[in-house]
Image (cartoon, rainbow, N blue to C red):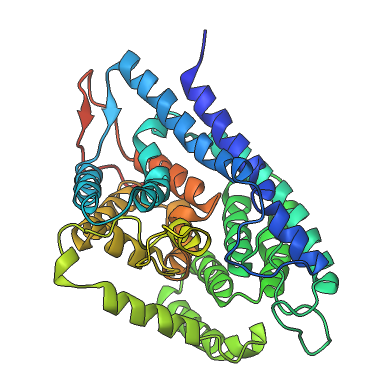
Amino acid sequence: MFNLSRTHANLIILGIIMTPVFGISEVLALISGALTSQSVALTPVYIKALKDIVFIAIIMIGIAEVSVRRRIFLNSSYAAFIVTVVCSIFLSLYFKNFLTILAGFRWILPVLIIPFIYRSVATNLQNRIAKWMITLFILGLLLQIAQLFLIKGWYGLNSFGLSKRNPGFYLIPSSMACFSALTAYYACFYCTISSLRRSIVFVLVPVSILLTASATGFIALALLWGYLLYCKFKQKLVLAITITVFFIGLLAMMPILTDREDIYVSLLDRSDILSEVVSLKNIFVSPDFGDATNTAMLLRTVMENGEKTSFIVDSTATSLIYNTGMLSFVFFAGFLYYSLRNAANKANISFFLVISPFVVTSILFELFPANLLLMVNIAFFYKQGNYWTSPGFVDNHQGGVRAV
């Protein structure tokens, strides 16, 4: 008999396994010195589209499962978020061209899988993800080490004459930092080999993030370490003060750790963009769906009919507000809060601490497999403290049992 839940799990694993191929041409061009622009996609569209096919397949199989079981998970905050997205799409049809709307759909696609993977996510799937994340991370780290010696000047050179930033199987270094930080989380909570777990979390991931020279990666790792230490010791107040002082010191030392004197300039730029996109015209819904996406920006670069109002955002929060309105941002934040509140334990708090810095510096909905893993973990955590309603249709339960 065809097992729909198992098929969902296998699609998730398949998507993760394919991660290195989605930017393979850009990485090879970076190493060979043939790269001329970061805004031009070199990997064929049919390869990059595979990750979209994974999401679409999950949704289509999910629809088939819903039709059989006649039940679907639909938290009220999530449902309200989807309503604001749909309203933004219809409103934007009058102001934006079809390609920009399509870019917006590609951007929101990962979020749409949550109701359909709700039944499929379980600890055994998380364990499988951990094994593949660790395997791919080791391959990525080896590639970073090779790039340290082979990349000549694209991201600048360090004081030893070696490549300053090494992005592994990505083109953008912070994307590899995100992958490494997520690997640390999965190794910490879902790797059963203690020696490998400690090596990944405390040795190899720090090396990888150091090779990316990503401040966001350092902050994410520091938050994970600090929280794990906080959970381990009884003197919470003293430890909290110590961790806070250490964290402030880490922020002050960031230009030295990353060998980047302008490390905080990009953060200030993102803050300025966020303040600019908050306006009355998108307080409820947005007429600019799709504009604040990397895909729309790429279309603007390579196509004459690309939307000229598209722009670089590099922030999940900013892209949410600009594409779908401030109200949708509130609803999505509320849904995240409920997924955390339903089963507050060390694992889900650690996950949100790891992922939260990248919300500020990346469009996570377009960063694979971070977008996939974000949705998997939101569904997993919500499911831990939730329950299915009787053959009804919608589960609007907002409470939950807190795990200790």
Q: Front-most of 245 and 110?
A: 110
Q: Answer with left or right where residue 385 lies relative to residue 205.
A: left
How many numbered callouts?
Answer: 0
- Find residue 110 and report its horizontal and vertical position in percent: 42, 44
> For this rendering, which residue is in front, 273 or 120?
273
| Left or right of 256 in this view: 203 | right
Q: Is residue 373 left or right of residue 129?
A: left
Question: Is residue 346 in sight in this rendering?
Answer: no
Q: Please provide percent x and percent y for residue 162.
A: 82, 80
Please name the residue shown 76% across and 80% down the image: 153
Residue 264, image x, y percentages: 50, 86
> Residue 382 location, x and y as percent?
35, 42
Residue shown at 42% from the left, 65% from the top? 359
Q: Is residue 167 visible?
A: yes
Eyeballing the image, is 342 above or below 351? Answer: above
169 and 40: which one is in front?
40
